[in-house]
Amino acid sequence: MEILDKLTILADSAKYDASCSSSGSKRKNNTTGIGNGNFAGICHSWGADGRCISLLKILFSNSCIYDCKYCINRSSNSVKRATFTPQEVADLTINFYKRNYIEGLFLSSAVIRSPNYTMEMLIKTVLILRNEYNFNGYIHCKTIPGSDQSLIDKLGKLVDRMSINIELPSNNSLKLLAPQKEKANILQPMSYVSNNIKLNRLDKNKFKPNFVPAGQTTQLIIGATPESDLKILKLSEGLYNKLNLKRVYYSAYISVNNDKNLPMLSSPPLLRENRLYQADWLIRFYGFKANELLDETHPNFNNILDPKCEWALRNIEKFPIEINTADYFTLLRVPGIGVISAKKIIRARRTFLLDFQELKKLGIVMKRAKYFITCKGKYYDKVYKFNQSFIETNLIYQERLSIPNKNFEQLSLFDNLSPTKEDKIKCLTGSL
């Protein structure tokens, strides 16, 4: 098979993997090499400065020995199969880099023959790039569950970031849709990588070169199984706390196979994915806990209001807060005030007392924040009632106005809505 045909098949197969983001890694170039890794990040996404960052994102192979019911590359599917050689992937990466098409490589693979064989092929590929081509750019590589620790250790010393996909949020779901995979074969390598990253940071002289300097990530498929948002979010929180993951990625389930154990969805649950990303941001940067955002009586997020607004309405007794006296962490709990905005407020009020006009100038999202704050002891001029029903009605009205071609109807957790433009901006900026 021609290499262009392989590239067409394996680049398309990689589109279902969402686990690529900014690198957080810095590898300097030398006089004999090409490329470099930067803290700014190399990914197929948007950088903090608004620029689009590109990388070559492919599978090494889509010829899988597993028959996971949700996967397009399952062994029982009749799809075009292809497998690169290590040299072919290395040559593609270098040629694309020299033409300024990419800044790095995101390499994953189906399981060929066995987990160990697949890992050996990935290691050979990265060794060619690092040693023969002296490529010092960013490389994100998948760890194959079930492979030996010695192989994980070898790959971890060559790449910037590693990821091991959990994919399904519970052991029961794994048995139902991917019976050939075992939970232990996923969590044990994640724990091993996490421990080695910690040791590397504690004793850099002992671990040369650096072991996975940009950390590890994982991916969860949303909507293929019946787990609630609460269960998914608690799993993510545990991974952050216990394994110090860099990111958990949420991928809305896309129906590509027919199976009695799979849900019949007319479209991917993109809004649910969006809500989980927003909640994930609140846990990582705003100091929220999963049990604060959801509980057994409210196990799923609201389709209309973002998680922060929903939390504020359920805890209305904590509001309003005085903008000129509240501490930083209290400010972060106000809908419409993000991390950057809270820092601006703290700095600005050192010199003068803030009013609502000043808050607008600082970039606060007043259409949400105005219901939960006071300035100099006064409410916003149009907020003549401070009660949950009044605030909720107005917030829902504002959110529905931002959804085009939708008639007003009773609020439901099961509306078939899509993320609005503002929702997408929130996920990029983290301002909730």
Image (spheres, helix red, strand yellow):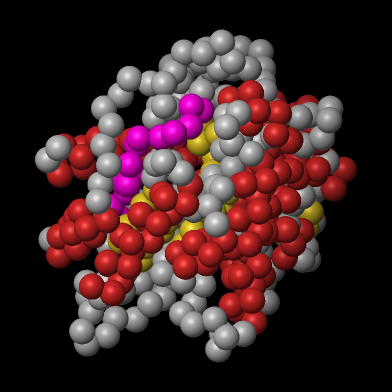
Q: Is residue 56 magenta?
A: yes
Q: Is residue 211 or residue 264 the one in the foreground?
A: 211
Instruction: Return the residue found at the far right.
Output: 317
Q: Residue at 12% across / 40% down in the picture?
A: 2
Q: Would you place residue 17 above or below residue 195 in this image?
A: above
Q: In x, y percent, where is residue 117?
A: 42, 50
Q: Would you place residue 263 above or below residue 21 in this image?
A: above
Q: In x, y percent, where is residue 420?
A: 47, 32
Instruction: Say how many tags the image has.
Output: 0
Q: Can residue 122 be seen in this view?
A: yes
Q: Residue at 53% across / 64% down in the picture?
A: 150
Q: Residue at 51% across / 61% down in the picture?
A: 152
Q: Does the magenta stretch include residue 401?
A: no
Q: Would you place residue 119 above or below residue 328 in this image?
A: above
Q: Is residue 371 or residue 180 the one in the foreground?
A: 180
Q: Is residue 49 visible?
A: no
Q: In which quarter of the image is residue 375?
A: bottom right
Image side of residue 80 versus residue 344, left or right: left
Q: Quadrant of residue 140?
A: bottom left
Q: Is residue 384 or residue 26 the one in the foreground?
A: 26
Question: Magenta part of the protein: which range?
Answer: 47-68
Q: In x, y percent, where is residue 322?
A: 78, 58
Q: Is residue 114 or residue 63 the one in the foreground?
A: 114
Image side of residue 395 versus residue 74, left or right: right
Q: Residue at 39% across / 41% down in the picture?
A: 112
Q: In which quarter of the image is the N terminus?
A: top left
Q: In x, y percent, where is residue 301?
A: 68, 31
Please identify the dominant SS of the magenta region: loop
